[in-house]
Image (cartoon, rainbow, N blue to C red):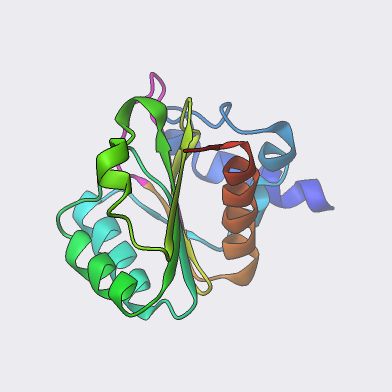
Amino acid sequence: MQLTSSLEFIPKYKDYFSTHDIMRLPVSFISRLGELSQANLSADTVATLNKVQQALVDAETFGCGIAEGTIPELIAPKMDEKVHEGLNFKFLLPENRFPSHKSLSEVPKNVQIRSLFELPALVVVTEKFAAICFLQIGGKVDYAGFLGDDPTFVNWVKELFVYYWEKGKLI
């Protein structure tokens, strides 16, 4: 019965999954893709960024992200505001886009950064909201992905983040 939701979820979004790479994920997460079934697919970059920005504004205890190396200009001011309010953030960045040691000395204490050799997806998760944008086949980013506040979905994305956070290199 647990596999039923995954078997229904993937065909429902077959056009998305035919162009986006889920094979970068561990098998244990692929087998649980049905847990994303209550999330909404967004193919609109601006809408996705707006929802992520609002989620960061609404975050109360933490924010985590796997990013391609830069924070979109639309989101950066709100993140800075939340950091100054004391919200804890954790970021995973690709090794080839990692900030210099000099700029790392300027990172506030409530922000932690680690690096990964290769990104599995773009991820944002707070205690109430999550977003995951799988990379296109070939590794490009288009910000099309799944967004939502369903607790099962948020937990799946959080567990995925933690899995990669533990594999990330501490600088």
Rendered residue at 46%/28% (across/down) = 18
- Say if residue 112 shows up in the picture: yes
Residue 171 at x, y percent in the picture: 47, 38
Which quarter of the picture shows residue 19? top left
**Is 138 a magenta residue?**
yes
Where is residue 36 drawn, in percent x and y? 58, 55
Q: Residue 69, can we see it?
A: no
Q: Is residue 41 left or right of residue 159?
A: left
Q: Main secondary structure of the magenta part?
A: loop
Residue at (49% x, 77% y) in the render: 61
Query: Magenta segment, which residues?
Result: 131-144
Residue at the limit of the structure toward the top, as seen here: 138
Quarter of the rendering containing residue 150 = bottom right
Compared to 112, does 170 lie above or below?
A: above
Image label count: 0
- The percent position of residue 160, horizontal first and vertical second, equals 61, 48
Depicted 133 relative to depicted 157: above or below = above
Left or right placement of residue 160 versus residue 87 in this view? right
Of residues 101 and 41, the one drawn nearer to the viewer in this rendering: 101
Horizontal arrangement in the rendering, residue 132 relative to residue 11 (left or right) = left
Looking at the picture, how far across and down is residue 95, in whole percent?
40, 28
Q: Name which residue lies at 25% across and 51% down.
A: 44
Residue at the far left in the pictured view: 73
Q: Nearer the viewer, residue 30 or 119?
A: 119
**Horizontal placement of 79 versus 62: left or right?**
left
Identify which residue is drawn at 49% across, 43% down. 13
Q: Residue furthest right?
A: 1
